[in-house]
Image (spheres, helix red, strand yellow):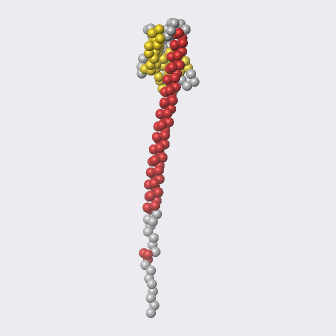
Amino acid sequence: MSFKILKSKTSNLKPKNEGFIALITVLIISAIGLMIGVGLGLGSIGEMKMGLQKSQSSEAYYLANLCVEEALMTLKEGGTYTEKVTIDMENGSCTIFPIEGNWTVKVLGTASNQVKKMKIVISQIFSEMVIDSWQEVADF
């Protein structure tokens, strides 16, 4: 008597979704990595824009102070400003407005899209210059 071993046809079949879980896992991890990378990139761009804006703001401030010093030197030498005068520099410009009243100096410094305005009130010029106030203002 001989026995035959029958093989089941279902035992040789491999499941068709064997790599499906691994593929989904790789896709999810890649998507998370991509989101983190994009978030870091956008944050870096925002920081760079703020740094540039700060730099331009500082340039505008220094340009405004340049015009203030120029105006004070002119006043000390006996000159005055009856018309608006603009001084152009490599990184921007500054404008000295006509002197008002008893020596009120108004200047505007501009660098790229940043603007700084200064207002200086002087009470005495001759013999010794006396500055009552020197301040950055929002508007004249």
Instruction: Return the residue nearer the eye: 104 or 29.
Output: 104
Vertically, is 116 above or below 11?
above
User: Looking at the image, how many numbered discs can be counted on the residues?
Assistant: 0
Name the spot of residue 43 as percent of width and height, x first: 46, 40
Q: Residue furthest front?
A: 128
Residue 73, by quadrant, is: top right
In the rendered view of the protein, which quadrant contains the C terminus?
top left
Residue 80 seen in render: no
In the rendered view of the protein, which quadrant contains the N terminus?
bottom left
Instruction: Return the residue nearer the eye: 118 or 5.
Output: 118
25 to the left or right of 89: left
Residue 32 seen in render: yes
Instruction: Return the residue nearer the eye: 19 or 136.
Output: 136
Q: Residue at x 44, y 80 (%)?
A: 7
Name the spot of residue 33 as percent of width and height, x first: 47, 50
Q: Residue at x 44, y 15 (%)?
A: 133
Q: Residue at x 47, y 8 (%)?
A: 124
Name the spot of residue 110 as percent of width and height, x first: 50, 23
Name the spot of residue 51 as percent of width and height, x first: 49, 33
Vertically, is 64 above or below 2?
above
Q: Residue at x 47, y 37 (%)?
A: 46
Q: Residue furthest right?
A: 90
